[in-house]
Amino acid sequence: MNHARQYLIDNGIKPSVQRIAIMKYLFEHRTHPTVDDIFHDLHDAIPTLSRTTVYNTLKLFAEKGAILSLTIDEKKVRFDGYKQRHAHFRCLECDEVFDISLDRDVEFPQEDGLRGFKAVETHVYHRGYCAECAKKKNFNNN
Amino acid sequence: MNHARQYLIDNGIKPSVQRIAIMKYLFEHRTHPTVDDIFHDLHDAIPTLSRTTVYNTLKLFAEKGAILSLTIDEKKVRFDGYKQRHAHFRCLECDEVFDISLDRDVEFPQEDGLRGFKAVETHVYHRGYCAECAKKKNFNNN
DNA sequence: AAACAAGAATGTAATAATTACAACTTTGTA
DNA sequence: TACAAAGTTGTAATTATTACATTCTTGTTT
């Protein structure tokens, strides 16, 4: 069963070797990878893969709504193949991005109450120190 | 009365002509300007101003917690001198960033319930179409 | 007031992520 | 098999941001 392939089709994206591999990668790596992470990791399996293709592909996926592009990292865009509503947490120390459950409902603005604004997507970003780094910091500073 | 000057001092930032001008600009322009917006607009008043100074200054302000740096725009960082808790909305058409009130409380993760994660800041970003652009789109498409 | 040191500002050069683009390849179909 | 459309590739360009060495300010000490 090729889950990634079907997922692309369901999202109106023509599958190709590269696209399937990238989508598969995002399903299997919930690490919010960057273009370079993906490019680097898929290079063994697809030696001809081009960085431009990774850029093009991820942009297409995001436009089609198949994935999320995250701007939580001010340096580079990160990508997330997990579409369930959740928040993100970036550690200022180790720079990793974690999924955070949204316990309470976040206000997702709809047609009303927003002066006619139409929201397409909503992101909740937290920045701070992850459990591990927070622990280290406390040991050293306090 | 120099509000900006005092505000900098209160935030542990030594005031200078450039710093006061940039802080004043942020107080007076609730437009979430980029480095280049600020550099361009202050150039008349301070012809010797350097783009690097604007970068350094904004980074310092953000580190000291005097302003917010927004990554809602994947191209460049935007800055916000308004510190009250609020969300942001970027229009995918006209590219402007608007303040949006946070009606319900957003989950601000604290020490508990977050596996030891320590959040420093939380941002809520909406992307979509602002009232004006949404109206135009409807006229043309529907 | 002159000398001095620390911090700030400046301008240019480097870096790094992203995009533009033209050439080449793959795919599906007639 | 031929062909067109779409997809991929690699290089070159673009753009935001940072590094860094030099110059300028400011406040302090003599």
Image (tube, coloured by chain):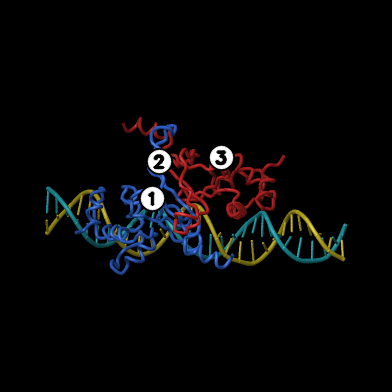
Chain colours: A blue, B red, C cyan, D yellow
Residue receiving disc 3: B30
**Regarding mark 1 in the picture, which secondary structure is present there?**
loop
Residue receiving disc 2: A108
Residue B38 position within the rendered picture, expressed as x and y whole percent measured from the top left = 58, 46
Q: Which of the two marks, 3 or 1, is nearer to us in this view?
A: 1
Chain letter of the residue carrying label 1: A
Report if the CB atoms under discs 1 and 2 are less than 8 Å apart: no
- Tags 2 and 3 both on a single chain: no
Q: Earlier in the sequence, mark 1 or mark 2?
A: 1
In this rendered view, identify the residue nearer to me: B48 or A110: A110
Residue receiving disc 1: A86
Report if the CB atoms under discs 2 and 3 are less than 8 Å apart: no
Indicate left or right for A139 with B12 as reference.
left
Residue A8 position within the rendered picture, expressed as x and y whole percent measured from the top left = 25, 52
Please state which amino acid type lies under the numbered disc 1.
His
Please state which amino acid type lies under the numbered disc 3.
Arg
Q: Quadrant of the N terminus of chain A?
A: bottom left
From what the image shows, is residue B101 above or below residue A98?
above
Q: Residue furthest bottom?
A: A44
Q: Is residue B48 visible?
A: yes
Distance CA(mark 2)–CA(mark 3): 23 Å
Chain letter of the residue carrying label 3: B
Indicate left or right for A127 with B16 as reference.
left
Q: Residues within 10 Å of mark 2 (few under 14, many from 20)?
A: some
The residue at 43%/58% (across/down) is: A97
Distance CA(mark 3)–CA(mark 1): 29 Å
- Tags 1 and 2 both on a single chain: yes
Residue C6 position within the rendered picture, expressed as x and y whole percent measured from the top left = 72, 63
Q: Residue furthest front?
A: B112
**Regarding mark 3 in the picture, which secondary structure is present there?**
loop
Q: Quadrant of the C terminus of chain A?
A: bottom right
Chain letter of the residue carrying label 2: A
